[in-house]
Amino acid sequence: MTQSNWQETRETILIVDDVSENLEVLGRILAPDYDVRVAQNGHETLKIAQEHPELDLILLDVMMPEMGGFETCSLLKSDSLTREIPVIFVTSRNTAIDEARGFDVGGVDYLTKPINPSIVRSRVRTHLELSSANRRLRMQNKALQENVHLLEQIQQIARHDLKAPLSIFMGASDLLEQDGNLTPRQLQFLRVLDRSAMKMLNMIDRTLDLYKMERGLYQLHPNLVDILNLAHLALLELESLSRKKAVGCVMSLDGRVPDQADTALVQGETYLLATIVSNLAKNAIEASPEGGTVCLALETGNPFRIIISNQGTIPPEILPRFLERYVTFGKPNGTGLGGYSARLMARTLGGDIKYHSAPESGTVLTVSLPNPAMPPSLQSSSD
């Protein structure tokens, strides 16, 4: 049988059999549609595959002298250069044990002799299509990895450039506080500005975190965090927004007004938990009708719950997609990332966010977080 030349326009198949008549039969079936190469033993197969790893498919006989098909396939799959080439076994051995062994060593299919030309063509076409799809996925994954590397480089430059003016702002804040001529109220808001600047600095350092969370690559480092303190700080930072909208903010801990000695500890990361509380509280204030009230309730136990409610309702246009990425309504400068990032962070922490919105009850968002450190005797009776 004459071997076809290697061409980029047609897929290339390597047929392996120690019997020339079998090579001729398979060659006649496949040569009209594909470029065909042949080999008559395992050693020749390995050599051709290593020299031409762009092979699209190998049809491999099982019973061959010196090196059988199973051993040949196993060696192909152990080599990073040739492991992606799909292998179909062609053999007269048709027991379930033989077929199972063929799949165990890396084969993608198993054809028994005597071969049926239509079945051969159909199986070959199917696995070539699968192989082509896998190749495209690998190329897309490689491009994605390159894009991630480029994004990291851009982020490094951006972080460096953003930190310089932010450092000046923080330095000026410290100098103002040292002057000693500010009222207690002015000092309080100056410290709010300082904390906000520190939060911004932290956000700059963690610009890739959302991307990593979306792809399950984020490395969580949990510790005990006082959410009550985070909630106090969040409402203090949002005070100017709530004043502008004439919205009142109230907070409760297990159904009562918390006092200064209270804490509400949960396993998590301070940055993630602070962002969840801040984003959801900000959204609630913005969505609340003028003169309304935003309630931030903390319920200790396992799960730990953060319940944020307001009298506003989620527009019907976005209700089913409220916490999805880029979903926003009625906010000219809204990004649609506040609720989305909060839910992503909650899920990264092993929890989730549920919501309900109706004209008669307003909108309620419930963040549930696992809290295994909570003693069983103090866990919520509803769980």
Image (cartoon, rainbow, N blue to C red):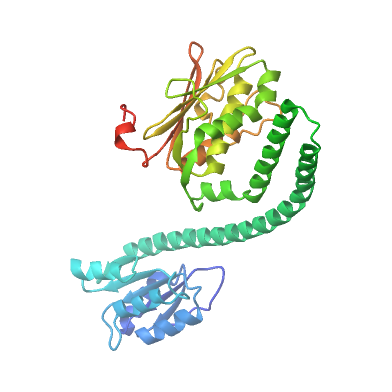
Residues 201 and 191: in front is 191
Count of residue discs: 0
Q: Where is residue 334 in the image (x, y as percent from the top left)?
A: 67, 30
Q: Where is residue 271 in the image (x, y as percent from the top left)?
A: 56, 43
Q: Position of residue 335 (x, y in %)?
A: 65, 34
Q: Name the image quarter holding the C terminus.
A: top left
For residue 359, above or below residue 152: above
Quarter assignment of residue 313: top right
The residue depicted at 74 percent of the width and 50 percent of the height is 163
Q: Position of residue 246 (x, y in %)?
A: 67, 15
Classify residue 112 as left or right of residue 188.
Answer: left
Residues 374 and 162: in front is 374
Let me know if residue 99 appears in the view. yes
Q: Residue furthest bottom?
A: 66
The residue depicted at 56 percent of the width and 58 percent of the height is 140
Let me know if residue 279 appears in the view. no
